[in-house]
Image: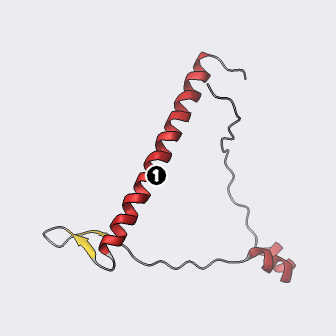
Amino acid sequence: MLLNEDTTKLYSEMIEAKKLAEKYEKKYKELSEQMKELLGDEELTDLEGNLIVKYVLMERINFNADAFKKDYPELYEKYKNKKSSFKQAKFGKVVL
């Protein structure tokens, strides 16, 4: 489809929204880091003691599927699941 008035307007709005989202995501991360440093191990509560925010150390365990596939190819094939697919925007270099 070639650009037309509707697609040009929509594309321009998408790009502007993306820029704003990136700006506010960056700002949120900065403020979150400041709050994390300020609180340390403490909780932020209101006057009634209701929790507002608390930073908790989270541990993540990852599964090395590539190594498992190499070591146990039959089991890998038996238990692998297809992830759901979705369309993602890939932007070209066109600037409107």
Residue at x 68%, y 38% (from the top left corner) = 91
- Amino acid carrying label 1: it is Glu
Most foreground residue, 3 or 74: 3
Q: Residue 52 is drawn in which quadrant?
A: bottom left
Number of other residues with Cα within 10 Å of mark 1, as a class: few under 14, some 14 to 19, many 20 or more: few
Residue at x 75%, y 75% (from the top left corner) = 65
Most foreground residue, 6 or 22: 22
Expressed as whole percent of the image width and height from the top left, the position of residue 85 reads 69, 52
Residue at x 41%, y 58% (from the top left corner) = 30
Q: Is residue 28 left or right of residue 22?
A: left
Expressed as whole percent of the image width and height from the top left, the position of residue 37 reads 35, 71
The N terminus: image quadrant = top right
User: Would you name the residue on which mark 1 appears?
Assistant: 25
The C terminus: image quadrant = top right
Placement of 42 over or under 12, stated as above or below:
below
Q: Is residue 35 left or right of residue 12?
A: left
Q: Is residue 44 left or right of residue 30?
A: left
Placement of 28 over or under 57, stated as above or below:
above
Residue at x 37%, y 59% (from the top left corner) = 31
Expressed as whole percent of the image width and height from the top left, the position of residue 45 reads 21, 70
Instruction: Specify the farthest residue to the left.
Output: 47
